[in-house]
Amino acid sequence: MTNLTATKNTSDLSSLFIFDNFEGEEQQAFLEEVGTLIFQSALMQHLSVVSDIEAERFERFVESHIDTETFVDVLCLEFPQFEKVLTSEMRAFNSEMKL
């Protein structure tokens, strides 16, 4: 997932909600929380289908890169299957919110 894709996904999330009662910082906090929930869902789904060895490698990678600005981008480059799961989770959330 490139930065452009991450930005697009954030704007996709923000277009799902009406923020009449939220200011900029509140909107950002809300979107970050929703993003975290989607990420956690993708994480659990990914870890449930990979081998124990791959799960350990994934967890070590997350632990060593989580504080970087491009964490999600780098994670998706290193683990393309995770990117597919994350994209699927974002689309599923997007579909559910539009109902």
Image (spheres, rainbow, N blue to C red):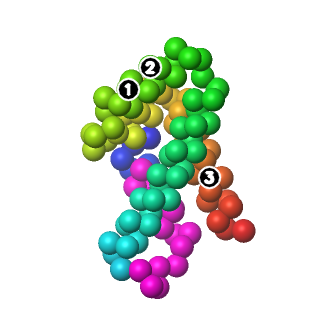
Precedes in sequence: disc 3 or disc 1: 1
- In the rendered image, the quadrant that contains the C terminus is bottom right
- In the rendered image, the quadrant that contains the N terminus is top left
Task: Report whether residue 84 is seen.
Answer: no
Left or right of 68 in this view: 43: right
State yes or no: discs 2 and 1 in contact (Cβ < 8 Å).
yes
> Which residue: 52% across, 18% down?
54
Is residue 87 depicted above or below 22 in this figure?
A: above
Residue type at numbered disc 1: Phe
Is disc 2 placed on a helix, strand or loop? helix
Disc 2/disc 3 C-alpha distance (Å): 26 Å
Q: According to the image, label 3 marks what residue?
A: 91
Q: Which residues fall within the magenta stretch?
A: 6-22
Specify the quadrant of the image occupied by residue 76. Answer: top left
Where residue 40 sits: x, y (%)?
52, 44
Q: Which of the numbered marks, if any, corresponds to residue 57? A: 2
Is disc 1 placed on a helix, strand or loop? helix
Precedes in sequence: disc 2 or disc 3: 2
Of badges 2 and 3, nearer the viewer stands 2
Where residue 20 sits: x, y (%)?
46, 85
Is residue 63 depicted above or below 36 in this figure?
A: above
How busy is the neighbourhood of tag 2: few (under 14 within 10 Å), some, or many (20 plus)? few
Disc 3/disc 1 C-alpha distance (Å): 25 Å
Specify the quadrant of the image occupied by residue 81. Answer: top right
Give the camera-side residue of 37 and 1. 37
> Which residue: 58% across, 45% down?
41
Residue type at numbered disc 2: Arg
Does the magenta portion include 52? Answer: no
Is residue 33 depicted above or below 70 in this figure?
A: below
How busy is the neighbourhood of tag 1: few (under 14 within 10 Å), some, or many (20 plus)? some
Q: Which of the numbered marks, if any, corresponds to residue 61? A: 1
